[in-house]
Image (cartoon, coloured by chain):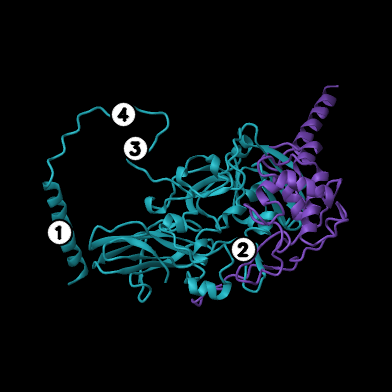
Amino acid sequence: MNGPRRAFLRLLALGSGVAAACRAKAPAPLPSLLGAPISPYGDRSPFVKATRQISDRTRTPEQASSLTPLADTYGIITPSSLHFERHHSGVPKIDPDEHRLMIHGMVDRPLVFTVAELQRLPSISRIHFVECSGNGGNGWAPTPRPTVQGTHGLTSCSEWTGVKLSLLLGEVGVQSGASWILAEGADPGKMTRSVPMAKAMDDAMVVYAQNGEPLRPEQGFPLRLFLPGWERNSNVKWLRRLKVVDQPYMTREETSKYTDLMPDGTARQFTLVMDAKSVVTHPSGGQKLVGPGFHEISGIAWTGRGRITRVEITTDGGATWKDAALQEPVLPRAHTRFRFAWDWDGGEAVVASRVTDETGYMQPTRAELVAVRGVNSNYHNNMIQAWKVRGDGAVEYAVI
Amino acid sequence: MRSFSILVFAAALGAVAVAQSAHYKVGRPPTPDEVKAWDIAIGPEGKELPSGRGAVDRGKVVYADQCSRCHGATGVEGPEAPLVGGQGTLKSKRPIKTVGSYWPYATTLFDYINRAMPFDRPTIMSADDVYAVTAYLLNVNGIIKPDEVMDAHTLPAVRMPNRDGFVPDPRPDVGTRKTKGR
């Protein structure tokens, strides 16, 4: 049977099923009660319950992370209220009128800017993912996590608006010999990271807005550094200071933390770019397929090295792979939504995705990663993530 | 007289222009006090370290007062990540990453304690006490002797055991099965 005809018959079958379900109930009454009045700031339907996941084992909720419910988001934009969080000393409450950004060090004109002054400058808006380099870190053990929120919820994607950092650096005049920038936040821990000048002059931004409104406090209100495609921790939130210097400052977050320990006892440092990664969000752990028949396999893919070019799907644990459709827009350093039409026969199936990016890099298996990096590097695990669909439709964590 | 006034006005304008950003003429220069108050970062050479000094004995007292409730009585008990021990474990199946086994620079220890610790009340410690507790942690990790004093000269000279343990990013190290890989 050819494809379209088969699909048409499947739709017919689906339609008759729906009709049968509707016949079983009395028809719903015509809407007649007045609805709720207008409101100054919108909220979602009370029937929508998805939330960020917070570990109940957290001793210090100010120094913790929360995870985006990827299985309950659609398209590529993460609602700001569901953007994952990772804070090192809590979310500071900052009055934007009082906040300042100082740029100094090896510059001709050290300057202090108000937020309003930065907002007067030529602006730029870009859609980019932000991902914690610890995302997927449970895969090193591997430690089963019941849902995709648990395995991959430390990535989110937003439209970010701000000023190009290269513009600001042009305003202050970078002196010769300068090669790094020390970025510091206004959180109580004054989180600090060193950023290579090449990235600062390329696509780095100082951001003040997210998804059409000012940054959320959890994302750095009123200012954050934004380094497209680079590990989240280097995208310093509540940005208050950029010091132009001639070497990395070897801060705690780039020595003791966010370094990747290898089997030979050495640790990789400044592993800043996030490699290509993809994950199936439907079907994914914790979901239950209602029964055999049509199911859309869907998920997200991204790479810190540009655009993704291909996503392949397996439903047989990696024995065979078929191309998924990529939902436009396919943007550089942004989530890309992929879809794959699947006719589930009701038998056990192991579903996974793997992405290839424009550099030709293909997402590895866990075994390929572990063969090179061992299991103690904590960060930058981009292994293929599988989900097993059991015969009863229940979906659970799997490794292929 | 009038032309003199215009000249003065123009000179003042010029001064303002120089003091603002190059093209869009926004921002203002920071005052020396502002830079001094904000610029607390200590690089690996320790050039920015403040005056002050601290000994191991005093550091033991500071540690008990400010640090032990999260890092344990001797820096190994937790509940937060251990600060002491672990040397020789980095290649093992269960590496223990501490100040002594993992941190490449002693200056980072001063910088981090000074900016972020204690967790719930950062910046309450004096420079002397930050030097002292830094000295204590270096001593209990076997890196400096009990009678050594840490200050802007001695701290950058401390050589950490894992100083040469870090390597640059070699990726892509996996996932390059396609010919276009880089």
Answer with mark 4 or mark 2, whichever residue precedes in sequence: 4
Q: Is any part of residue B44 visible from this angle?
A: no
Label 4 and label 1: CA atoms lie apart by: 38 Å
Label 1 SS: helix
Q: Is residue A159 left or right of residue B59?
A: left
Label 3 and label 4: CA atoms lie apart by: 12 Å
Tag 1, which chain?
A: A
**In the image, what residue occupies the spot 35% across and 75% down?**
A320
Answer with mark 4 or mark 1, whichever residue precedes in sequence: 1
- Are callouts 4 and 2 both on one chain? yes
- Are callouts 4 and 1 both on one chain? yes
Label 3 SS: loop
Answer with mark 2 or mark 3, whichever residue precedes in sequence: 3
Q: Which mark, residue A46?
A: 3
Tag 3, which chain?
A: A
Q: Which chain is cyan?
A: A
Label 3 and label 1: CA atoms lie apart by: 33 Å
Q: Point out the frontmost of discs 1 and 2.
A: 2
**Among all residues in the image, which is located at the extreme top?**
B1
**Among all residues in the image, which is located at the extreme front?**
B73
To which quarter of the image does residue A187 belong? top right
Residue A264 percent location from the top left of the image: 65, 74
Q: Determine whether B128 is above or below A361 in the image.
A: above
| Badge 1 vs badge 2, beta-carbon distance below 8 Å | no
Residue under label 2, please give it. Answer: A271
Q: Point out the frontmost of discs 2 and 3.
A: 3
Q: Point out the frontmost of discs 4 and 1.
A: 4
Residue under label 4, please give it. Answer: A36
Residue under label 1, please give it. Answer: A12
